[in-house]
């Protein structure tokens, strides 16, 4: 089962989809890559760079030739793409994705490909970057990169295993989870911080003395707000796709801030030092582990 | 008036105080530096590195020889230090500091050196770093570094000018502000983000699934939480010293989060995209300016 596949269709040939294609090619796990996208120029660039071998602007016209389809398009387009490919899939065509949220993708698979769930494998490669477009595709992107697979109860184990094996051949570090568990974890460690950073910069920018504030912002501000430079539409999609888990995290954080506010109101020196100390200890431990793995 | 000074007393010979001494020595603006501190080993190291020329563990015993005293000790020690030096100051000894908050230092000057205010110059070099101790002192620290001076109404203009000139000879970029204005600006761009990042990491660390969350935290988390690795006692001091302005910023941020929460509850796609877009635009503009200056 682990011999790789002949034809890969990548819908959305950017950093994520393009790097998947390149890595599988290098590993000899795929013979032919068809890139599907809306922007012909990007697809032509991808073909010129050897990321894809064939261009299509319509997934319906190439789905029947695919052994595996990777949906690396924005979450907002996934439903439409699934609907378009549905009539053309072969019985054993594997359909997987690279979305940052999984509960919503599971729901879309159930809605648009209800007869095909045995071959559907929701997945999330944790490889964010500011780069985008075919020119961002790179061989090494998935080396030691975490990829979370959240198979459906209906997904055939051998199919989940084949997707796992393909990602491993890209150098990735594979993890299996339930979709709900995935979404809760990423609401905590990724989606909430983005929301907090966006809200913070928007607040500062709205102040009467915003210009003066920005003038004196330094490296702490720089790092805390880096993720507020992320793509607004993409993060709206993610926030709404993972709304339930994110709402819960936001409530939890508001409670955490209320605690800090009480400590501050009470000038509770010991309480503040304890909270800051807890945070520092956890952050230092996390960072040491993170560096070792990086 | 701008010829420099003969004897500089630096209380707290670490990154900030030590670098000030080194930079003034290199610029030929000071002839003799006395380092005051509690840890003899650190002072001996400083002397060995040429950062200071003489060691003292008691500011009272050397204050009478100082032309300028820089208080680079933690805010919590400043009142005691001022009380100790008060009886020994010459009429024209300049006293300045390097604290991150200024309203509290102004209050301490008024409390402990009420007869000496003409020669008191509160100041804040914006040169944070994880490094500490005499070995962290470096010549170049203040090159293009912002330094904010918040003179009292009683401070003689010529005295404020002399402190300004000394910092400029270290390569610093000088700014004059009112203490209240300084504290409001830094509550916004530095103290609030620290509080938010500490509160966030403490919250994650307290979750039942903390370990799993930390396992999947990546570069966004890394940057957003870097400042949560800061020194707990130092940030307790700063938070309490600038409590009033920080409380106001915290309330403002809680309102900003309530707005985000409403948008999320209403699944307001356009509203979220607008807020995220505002933040991104401000952050990108800020960063371009920040890089140009760096």
Image (cartoon, coloured by chain):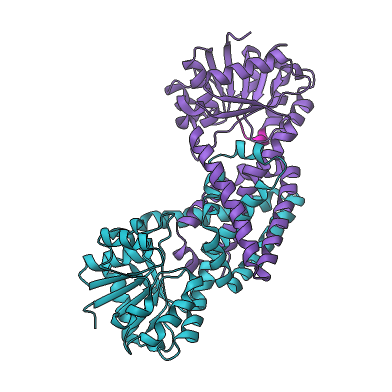
Chain colours: A purple, B cyan
**A8 part of magenta stretch:** no
Where residue B197 sits, quadrant-wise, is bottom right
Q: Nearer the viewer, residue B262 or A171?
A: A171
Q: Nearer the viewer, residue A101 or B116?
A: B116
Q: Is B157 left, or right, of B79 in this rendering?
A: left
Q: Nearer the viewer, residue A46 or B2?
A: B2
- Residue B141, horizontal then vertical, whole percent: 33, 60
Q: Is B192 left, or right, of A217 in this rendering?
A: right
- The vertical placement of B81 against B275, above or below, is below
Q: Which residues are magenta?
A: A72-77
- Residue A218, horizontal then vertical, whole percent: 45, 59
Q: Is residue B274 visible?
A: no
- Residue B232, horizontal then vertical, whole percent: 55, 59
**Residue drawn 70% across the image and 37% down it:** A183
- Residue A238, horizontal then vertical, whole percent: 66, 41
**A73 part of magenta stretch:** yes
- The vertical placement of B238 against B93, above or below, is above
Task: State the residue lying farthest toward the bottom.
Answer: B115
Q: Is residue B157 visible?
A: yes
**Residue drawn 50% across the image and 51% down it:** A223
């Amino acid at each position: 089962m682990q011999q790789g596949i002949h034809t890969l269709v990548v819908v959305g040939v950017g950093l994520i989809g393009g790097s998947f294609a390149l890595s599988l090619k290098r590993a000899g796990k795929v013979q032919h890559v068809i890139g599907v996208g809306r922007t012909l120029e990007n697809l032509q660039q991808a073909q010129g760079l050897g990321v894809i071998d064939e261009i299509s602007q319509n997934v319906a016209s190439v789905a029947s030739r695919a052994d595996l389809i990777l949906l690396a398009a924005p979450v907002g387009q996934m439903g439409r793409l699934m609907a378009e490919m549905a009539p053309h899939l072969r019985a054993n065509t594997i359909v997987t994705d690279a979305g940052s949220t999984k509960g919503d993708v599971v729901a879309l698979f159930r809605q648009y490909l209800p007869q095909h769930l045995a071959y559907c494998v929701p997945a999330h490669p944790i490889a964010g970057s500011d780069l985008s477009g075919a020119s961002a595709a790179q061989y090494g992107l998935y080396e030691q990169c975490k990829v979370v697979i959240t198979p459906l109860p209906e997904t055939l184990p051998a199919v989940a295993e084949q997707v796992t094996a393909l990602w491993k051949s890209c150098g990735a570090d594979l993890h299996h989870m339930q979709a709900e568990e995935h979404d809760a974890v990423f609401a905590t460690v990724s989606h909430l911080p983005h929301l907090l950073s966006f809200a913070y910069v928007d607040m500062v920018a709205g102040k009467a003395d915003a210009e003066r504030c920005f003038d004196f912002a330094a490296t702490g501000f720089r790092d805390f707000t880096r993720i507020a430079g992320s793509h607004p539409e993409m993060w709206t999609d993610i926030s709404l796709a993972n709304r339930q888990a994110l709402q819960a995290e936001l409530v939890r954080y508001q409670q955490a801030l209320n605690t800090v506010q009480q400590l501050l109101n009470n000038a509770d020196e010991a309480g503040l030092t304890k909270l800051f100390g807890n945070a520092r200890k956890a952050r230092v431990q996390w960072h040491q582990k993170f560096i070792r793995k990086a």
